[in-house]
């Protein structure tokens, strides 16, 4: 992950791991102190090198194919 707002990056990381922001109190504290924002919108996220489902099967051999 890369970003210019450390609070936003932490908040996004928590969401990726399934954590609630309330479970990580320093995020709210940092936001309250003006260090950044925990708000993450779809416009904030740019996905790079995301594999297409069809290309995954070309690069990986299933366990049944390996024998």
Image: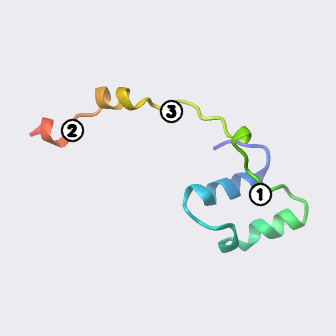
Give the alpha-carbon distance from disc 1 to disc 2, as whole Å: 40 Å
Q: Residue at x 73, y 38 (%)?
A: 43
How far from the left and from the top, in percent, is residue 23? 65, 73
State whether residue 59 is above or below residue 5: above
How far from the left and from the top, in percent, is residue 28? 79, 68
Residue 50: mark = 3
Q: Earlier in the sequence, mark 2 or mark 3?
A: 3
Q: Split into 4 quadrants, where in the image is the N terminus?
A: top right
Q: Earlier in the sequence, mark 1 or mark 2?
A: 1
Give the left or right position of residue 25, taking residue 51 as reference: right
Give the alpha-carbon distance from disc 3 to disc 1, as whole Å: 24 Å
Give the left or right position of residue 56, taking residue 61 as reference: right
Number of other residues with Cα within 10 Å of mark 3, as a class: few under 14, some 14 to 19, many 20 or more: few
Give the left or right position of residue 34, taking residue 64 as reference: right
The residue wearing badge 1 is 38
The residue wearing badge 2 is 62
Q: Dividing the picture into quarters, in which one does residue 46 lie? A: top right
Q: Nearer the viewer, residue 54 or 50?
A: 54
Q: Dividing the picture into quarters, in which one does residue 66 lie? A: top left
Check disc 3 and report its element: helix, strand or loop.
Answer: loop
């Amino acid at each position: 992950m890369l970003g210019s707002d450390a609070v936003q990056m932490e908040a996004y990381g928590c969401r990726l791991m399934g954590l609630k922001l309330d479970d990580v109190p320093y995020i709210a504290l940092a936001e309250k102190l003006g260090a950044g924002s925990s708000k993450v919108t779809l416009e904030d996220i740019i996905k790079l090198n995301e594999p297409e489902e069809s290309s995954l099967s070309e690069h990986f051999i299933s366990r049944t194919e390996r024998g």
